[in-house]
Amino acid sequence: MTTYNIKLEGEVLKVGFAERANGDQIVRDAAARLDEMIASGELKGGRLLKIDGPASVAVSYLIASKISHLYGAIAIFDPKIGRPGYKTFITAASTTAAYKIGELVETEEPQQANKVIHPKVVICGPAQSGKSCLREGLKQAISQIENAPYPYIITACPDGEGAWFSETAQRDPDLAKQLKKEYKSKFTPEFAQKASGWVKNANTPLNIIDVGGKITEENRLIMREATHAVILYGDKGKEEVSKWEEFCRGLDLRIIANIYSDYEGKEDQINNESSLLTGSVHYLKRGEDVSNRLMVKALARFLVDLRG
């Protein structure tokens, strides 16, 4: 079974991850699929090709190298920009005067599915509780659920830990720390406004937002655009939980999980109280694959079911 899905729907190339695998295998599978589509004439070229779906940096380079010569312009879907109800693509490659680099290409008709309010789930709570680890574990756990949507991750905290961090830390912890230090920047009002726009305009079926560990004006701007909240706290932040609950309720966020991050624990504890998931998740350590922890899998299932 392939690790990367590619199919053509009209003038839109739909792409997305399938079976979990290392990046080199994903690139090989994507290359094989593109070669097949080119050889069969399915990808025959044209004026404009839109690409919609998640891709790693390596896969993005591969797609560009394989098909950019076939099309006058290529535009990439960005769920963080554009008008609500419309899909907006950014022109990233062009050899024609019809489309300029950086030009926005909007879908001609409103996306009917976007009339549904898609979940925008913010992972929040006190600092150093393991939010980034939980975020990555959820992403991997959701990808293992049959027919689940690809979770769109928004890193709304300039701490240097992007989506790349967890896998890099598993392979090379020292490199991950070095890159995090280089990428880290200040949490400014300008960044908060930009991140708030990302959350507001996100229109994919399932969106997960990772925010900083303090109750601040910046987090208020970002989180007010979300729909649900997961509160994660460790031993150092137990006394702050009620403040985070009050903060979320003040922003009209539905709290769907209240989870204790038990760093020294050996197993997870789950208490599913109808609409609120509570309990604990153990040993959220940077570089660890936590996608198979009981709480992570339960929360992943909970988030997927929100769409129903």
Image (cartoon, rainbow, N blue to C red):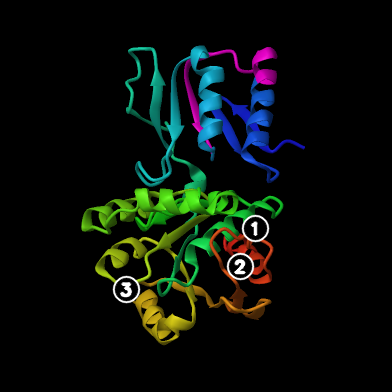
Q: Is residue 299 above or below residue 267?
A: above
Badge 1 element: helix
Q: Residue furthest left?
A: 189
Query: Looking at the image, how many numbered discs can be counted on the residues?
Result: 3
Q: What residue do we see at 53% from left, 28% from top?
A: 12
| Residues shaded magenta | 35-53
Q: Position of residue 272 (x, y in %)?
A: 64, 79
Check disc 1 and give the amino acid type: Ala
Badge 2: residue crowd in 10 Å (few <14, some 14–19, many ≥20): many
Q: What residue do we see at 66% from left, 65% from top?
A: 297
Question: Alpha carbon of mark 3 to alpha carbon of mark 2: how far?
Answer: 23 Å
Instruction: Quickly name the residue at label 1.
Output: 141
Check disc 3 and give the amino acid type: Ile
Instruction: Quickly name the residue at label 2.
Output: 299
Relative side of 1 to 130, left or right: right
Q: Position of residue 179 (x, y in %)?
A: 42, 48
Check disc 2 and give the amino acid type: Leu
Relative side of 99 to 74, left or right: left
**What is the number of the mark on residue 215?**
3
From the image, which quarter does the N terminus lie in? Answer: top right
